[in-house]
């Protein structure tokens, strides 16, 4: 009975609350209001450790001291001016130079430091030569990352950008074969994309997906998304690439050891990934068991869209947010 109630509540969240929250993530008015409220910004620090490089480096040091790896995202998306894209590139170059001063020497082929970037923040959506501008900007960042011994992973955004994003990734991997990208399991096309990139030996971060996509291109039901994730993960594990299991779902995490064993993979042949501020005890448990665990750490002033999508991902995140707001009002 209790299990059935939880399942019913989760379906209500997925079908009613999640679309409403994701709609809020696209509202400029709500964004401006949220950014002005100190109470909101205090709660945001659960998921976004700060706005400056110094802020994020404190979190990086703590995570590395605990044996966890990092992927750092300078928050920003949907850039509409070349100057904004240039600013984002300079922010990443400064971040990478600072990471390089840590002088981390990987004990394996796995690099502990990584940056994640959204091509829309690099100019992908610009009306004139946007795809070329984003590709060139990403190339500049990859060059700097290679010089300092870090990795780069290209984030996924809504489904309308997928073809462009994967085209840019294919081009860049010709020069930077270690470049990773993100595939979203809720998209119906993703199994085919996983099979392609697994065959080419790519690093793939597999996540469920964080945007409100139409049923014509995406699975909408929670169980269908989980089933798709497990099929896609099996395709990645069976290939020659490096799967990055980006999930907080216990069902998925519990399925990983058998897949690793059945596909003759070792500890250096895959990694778990989780978000900063979510299931910290589980992150530590996996790392303490000898697994590679990488934490996605965002920073910057443009936190609103990222933060609201995190709330929309899990009922527990929404509960945390509402409870924290209530506590700060008293």
Image (spheres, grey):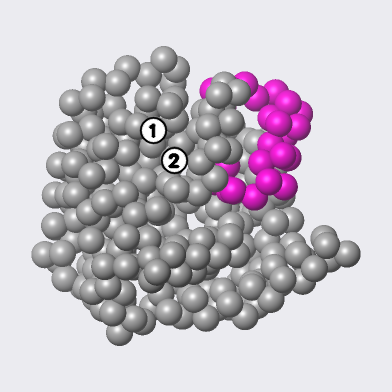
Prevailing SS of the magenta stretch: helix
Residue furthest left in the image: 83
Secondary structure, mark 1, is helix
* Mark 2 vs 1: CB contact within 8 A: yes
Residue 10 is at least partly visible in this image: yes
Q: Magenta residues, as a range?
A: 245-269
Residue under the image location 25 percent in, 38 percent down: 57
Residue 62 picture location, percent across and down:
35, 32
Q: Quadrant of the N terminus?
A: bottom right
In the image, taking residue 44 as reference, residue 245 lies left or right, namely right
Q: Tell me, for residue 295, which label it has, or none.
A: 2
Residue furthest bottom in the image: 29
In front of the other: 177 or 15: 15
Residue 132 is at least partly visible in this image: no
Q: Quadrant of the rendered structure where residue 289 is? A: top right
Residue under the image location 44 percent in, 30 percent down: 68
Query: Sequence order check: which comes first, mark 2 or mark 1?
Result: 1
Q: Which residue is mark 1?
A: 63
Above or below residue 106? Residue 186 is below
Residue under the image location 23 percent in, 74 percent down: 36
In the image, taking residue 147 as reference, residue 9 lies left or right, namely right
Residue 165 picture location, percent across and down:
40, 58
Q: Quadrant of the C terminus?
A: bottom left
């Amino acid at each position: 009975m209790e299990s059935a109630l939880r399942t019913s509540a989760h379906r209500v969240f997925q079908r009613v609350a999640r679309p409403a929250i994701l709609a809020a993530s696209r509202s400029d008015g709500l964004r401006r209001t949220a950014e002005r409220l100190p109470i909101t910004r205090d709660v945001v620090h659960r998921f976004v450790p700060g706005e400056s490089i110094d802020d994020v480096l404190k979190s990086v040091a703590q995570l590395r001291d605990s044996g966890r790896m990092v992927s750092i995202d300078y928050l920003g998306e949907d850039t509409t001016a070349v100057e904004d894209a240039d600013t984002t590139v300079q922010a990443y170059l400064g971040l990478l130079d600072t990471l390089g001063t840590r002088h981390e020497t990987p004990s394996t082929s796995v690099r502990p430091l990584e940056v994640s970037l959204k091509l829309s923040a690099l100019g992908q959506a610009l009306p004139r030569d946007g795809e070329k501008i984003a590709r060139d900007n990403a190339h500049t960042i990859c060059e700097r990352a290679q010089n300092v011994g870090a990795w780069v992973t290209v984030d996924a955004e809504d489904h309308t950008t997928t073809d462009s994003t994967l085209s840019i990734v294919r081009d860049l991997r010709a020069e930077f074969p270690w470049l990773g990208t993100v595939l979203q399991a809720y998209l119906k096309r993703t199994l085919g994309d996983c099979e392609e990139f697994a065959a080419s030996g790519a690093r793939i971060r597999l996540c469920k997906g964080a945007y409100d996509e139409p049923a014509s291109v995406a699975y909408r039901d929670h169980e269908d998304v989980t089933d798709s994730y497990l099929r896609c993960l099996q395709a990645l594990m069976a290939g020659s690439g490096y799967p990055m299991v980006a999930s907080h779902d216990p069902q998925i995490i519990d399925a990983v050891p058998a897949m690793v064993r059945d596909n003759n993979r070792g500890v250096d042949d895959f990694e778990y990934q989780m978000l900063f501020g979510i299931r910290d005890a589980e992150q530590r448990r996996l790392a303490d068991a000898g697994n590679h665990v990488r934490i996605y750490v965002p920073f910057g002033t443009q936190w609103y869209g990222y933060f609201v999508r995190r709330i929309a991902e899990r009922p527990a995140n929404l509960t945390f947010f509402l409870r924290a707001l209530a506590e700060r009002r008293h």
